[in-house]
Image (cartoon, rainbow, N blue to C red):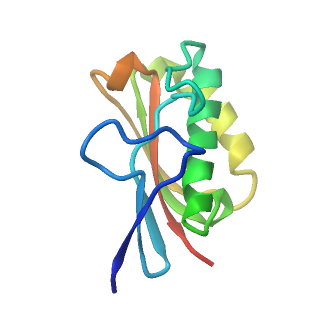
Amino acid sequence: MEREIIHTSNAPAAVGPYSQANRIGNLVFTAGQIALDPATGQLREDEIQIQTEQVLKNLQAVLQAAGSDLSHVVKTTVFLKDMAEFKAMNEVYGRFFPHDPPARSTVQVAGLPLNGRVEIEAVALVP
């Protein structure tokens, strides 16, 4: 199977030597998304809820460019700067995955790019 590099202007451009996502067959592997506004390239310096919403909108845009969407995500990894914000992040996350949510790991990290509060990566099926 060939690997297809996924790129969309509806999500933040990669800021290093990586792709927004890779599609291999019917699987999509996304890069981690932080709360960058794709229109401005600036980090949403808001509360964790606003950052989580932007992150998931960015993931949705990348997945759509690959022929998938959030309803086909099978696994996510959430990186939080502060685990004390887990509950607030989780409330927003749950709105984006209302039915049959994917498997998930959540870890606290020492830091995130641009001092973001949350980063999320995903693996999804392409229907």
Q: In the visual, does 80 lie left or right of 9?
A: left
Q: Position of residue 110 (x, y in %)?
A: 27, 22
Q: Position of residue 26 (x, y in %)?
A: 49, 79
Q: Quadrant of residue 47?
A: top right
- State the quadrant of the C terminus: bottom right
**Residue lying farthest to the bottom in this orientation:** 1
7 over 74 or under it: above or below: above
Name the residue: 50% across, 20% down.
42
115 over 41 or under it: above or below: above
Q: Position of residue 46 (x, y in %)?
A: 59, 13
87 over 67 or under it: above or below: above
Name the residue: 61% across, 50% down.
61
Q: Position of residue 88 (x, y in %)?
A: 62, 24
Nearer to us in this view, 25 or 49: 25
- State the quadrant of the N terminus: bottom left
Nearer to us in this view, 117 or 26: 26
Name the residue: 47% across, 32% down.
34
**Residue lying farthest to the left in this orientation:** 17
Q: In the visual, does 108 lie left or right of 64?
A: left
Nearer to us in this view, 8 or 35: 8
